[in-house]
Image (cartoon, rainbow, N blue to C red):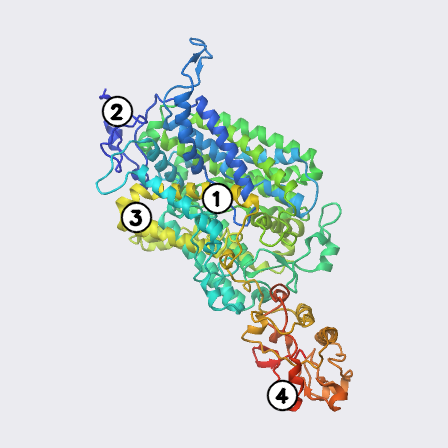
Amino acid sequence: MKHEDDLNEITSPLLQNTTGSTSYTQETETEKDENSPIEQVALTVPTTDNTTLPVFTFRTWTLGALACIMLSFLNQFFWYRREPLSITSISAQIAVVPLGHLMAAMITHRVFFPGKWCQFTLNPGPFNVKEHVLITIFANSGAGNPYAIHIVSAVKIFYGKTLTFWVALIVVVTTQVLGFGWAGIFRRYLVEPAAMWWPQNLVQVSLFRALHEKEPRPKGGLTRNEFFLIAFICSFAYYVLPGYLFPMLTSLSWICWIYPNSVLAQQIGSGLHGLGVGAVGFDWSSISSYLGSPLASPWFATANIAVGYGLVTYVITPLAYWFNVYEAKKFPIFSDDLFTATGESYNTSAIVASNFHFDSDAYEKEGQIYLSIFFAMNYAVSFACLTATVVHVFVFHGREMWDLSKSAFHEKKMDVHSKLMRRYDQVPQWWFTCILLTNIVATLFVIEYFKSQLQLPWWAFLLACGLAFFFTLPIGVITATTNQTPGLNVITEYIIGYLYPGYPVANMCFKVYGYISVKQAIVFLQDFKLGHYMKIPPRSMFMAQVCGTLISALVHLGTAWWLMDTVPNICERALLPPGSPWTCPGDHVFYDASVIWGLIGPRRIFGDLGYYNSINWFFLAGALAPILVWLLHKAFPSQNWITLITTPVLLGATINMPPATSVNYNSWIIIGFLSGFVAYRYHHNWWGRHNYVLSGALDAGLAFMGVLLYVSLDMEGVSLDWWGSNPDGCSLASCPTAPDEDASAKALASIVAQVVEPPPKDNIMVNHENVTVTPHLGVSIMETKEGTAIRIAEAVVQALKGELAATALNAPMVSAESHSNHGAKDRGSIKATTSPYHSQANGEAEVANREIVDIKKRMKEYKTCWVDELSSAPGAHSPRQRKEPEKNASKHRRKSFHGRGGKRRLSLG
């Protein structure tokens, strides 16, 4: 036996000959020299263990439950906001440290019922790292929002139907717990092998070591504790800028500043509503909100995401849009909304029958649903990602999976961490099996008994379980090696949408049981790997996960239910006051998906009856992509970079868009490059010591300041309103570029009817490069001006509909013969004359308006955005201009709209 000082030695490439920790002990000389074959793991995870440390203590239960409740409440509370603030378990990991030490110092050490089987103590000694790990695993259960909450939001808010609290609670709990069964089945494949290294866990391992190990200050540097404290304070202080004082830091879209009146430029440059060329964000919540911390992503995975994101966002989407694929120009280039053929928002409530089923007659009346081109292309690559996941794991990991299936681990295949974990009692497989079977039986009972609310037939639930079982392993492999999780939501929606169309709640439930149970299994497996690294007894891990999951489900649902009952018009963007944060971006996407896949069904959208059926070819493309990479690897075995091409990650790069936006990806990729490539390659020692600690500090500082700002300012209604308060600043980015005639006519009528004298200098139409403003209107009384404007608009609407135009302005109706004689061959063309001074002034028409030819092209820069963006319209000329009509007549300017065929004019008076 070694001396006690030697027992406390940490054997890691980062901390050699470091003493003073009571968290680990040395095992054997062989194990001391061993380490993980994964370099990042070897640099981060200790290869020692102390089996004498108490684990499941009173402190663990108390602080773990408290952390779980707080994170569940806060994450669900912030989930409904425009920029969802995700408070990770790292915040709780830091917050409980002083509480743990305080409890160790203040609570009695008395042993209750000494010598009996029920002997226990409230204070077994100093607060230790294993207690801390279990508390964090409790908190992990509350850090992720249960996906089943989306069902509650969609049914109660968007569909306006009934779903009782207890039915909702059962759905939330069963979807969460179902993942335990899949996690237990696949532990051998996804936890024990060293190759399944789960990069995200290294952030927390680094933080545990920084908080518990005593470390001498390196010469000219900082200890990890000092570095964490400085980074935490900086993150905490900085977030007051993007979080309150200067929200524009969330998305700096500088192209929009240069071209404030160009729809095309803003489509290209907007970081929140467009392609985001050059857009960046200096807000950690924006950077890490959808893809996780870029500091935790391996560089090869970051590179795959960058390539996939660039392919979809800057190649496929622009080409499809500007070649007008799927009539893309009628709709915004980037949007998660559903549209009619004319580009207006689709009235989904009109196609829902009274029995909450699909109304086919109403659908025929409303017409086909259309998607923005980015939304459509995102579905396409999601199809490809799904098949690529299965084929990639089969091709690149098939042999390894087969070997693990044939037998248990042999000693020679186990890394040092697996060897150290063998001393603890493992969780029996029958525990997982019992939970799985009990959950399946309970769910079958609930969906049959409450079928009127859930709509899901029993056979569909069993099919969802089969899909979850099939996909847990391949998705787990991708997540464990790349830190990115391919989504299973699309294929679940697709399958049930074909088999059971017209039932939106059934579609949502099928997706949740088939997809979220897999996602939950991935969370449990990741926690098991964290316990594996930190040498936590597996049975203690299991108990913490089960209890944390049950607490989390109840608190998440209770919080969501409370918000839906207390926040007026929550998630209803059209009814919310301007600037309201309760826009629910994630729930809108979920609801749109339920309409597409559940209510209408994929056959009417992506099938033989649908407009987007050609994107089904992406299923085949995704299956072929990993095979091509594998063949390249076989053809050029010396090129190691080929094996780093992970097609599921590449094709699934944009799976979070929308609700994620281009600025989220731009900033994430830049930070990932600086960390995973520049720092890792050229500042390797710094990266090894501080990279994951920095990630934890940024998360924690953001979380604490975000909560503080909300409690102290948002809840009190204290806000700032200035130029920097508007994130992005690209008001035209959501405008289409090929508006339809009816919508254009309506917009034109709205504009013409708004007579203002003089026009505001900042009016968009006045300053637009394609518009010339005319002050020519031969009336001076405000009522007459308004009446004239209305008659002009009515005439234009008639012309656009192919009808004969009535008097444009004080002129008789133009006959069909006269109309044709003037050469107006295009549908909707009119020719009329008007006099600004009327017949009593000079007896003749002074100015002839030119023909309105091809108005669809001329007005291509504006449609529905007119009504929203134009605060006023150009007004009439000054009365002084009427003194010299002959002199000024030639100088009167007309409002013009440009089409592709050159400049043509549309006179508004």
SS at badge 2: helix
Disc 3 crowd, CA 10 A, few/some/many (<14, 14-19, 20+): some
Q: Which residue is rendered at x = 51% and y = 47% of the image?
A: 487
Q: Amino acid at mark 2?
A: Leu
Which residue corresponds to mark 2? 7
Q: Is residue 275 above or below residue 444?
A: below
Which residue corresponds to mark 3? 680
Q: CA distance from mark 4 to mark 3?
A: 72 Å
Which residue corresponds to mark 1? 706
Q: Amino acid at mark 3?
A: Tyr
Q: Amino acid at mark 1?
A: Gly
Which residue corresponds to mark 4? 888
Q: Amino acid at mark 4?
A: Asn
Figure quadrant of residue 529: top left
- On the image, the x and y values in percent for residue 671 come to 38, 52
Q: Is residue 567 left or right of residue 183?
A: right
Give the mark nearer the N terminus: 1 vs 4: 1
Give the mark nearer the N terminus: 1 vs 2: 2
Q: Which residue is rendered at x = 24% and y = 34% of the image?
A: 216
Disc 4 crowd, CA 10 A, few/some/many (<14, 14-19, 20+): few
Q: Is residue 57 left or right of residue 771?
A: left
For discs 1 and 2, the disc positioned in front in the rendered view = 1
Closest to the observer: 899 or 616?
Answer: 899
SS at badge 4: helix
Q: Is residue 154 above or below residue 732?
A: above
For discs 4 and 3, the disc positioned in front in the rendered view = 4
The N terminus - image quarter: top left
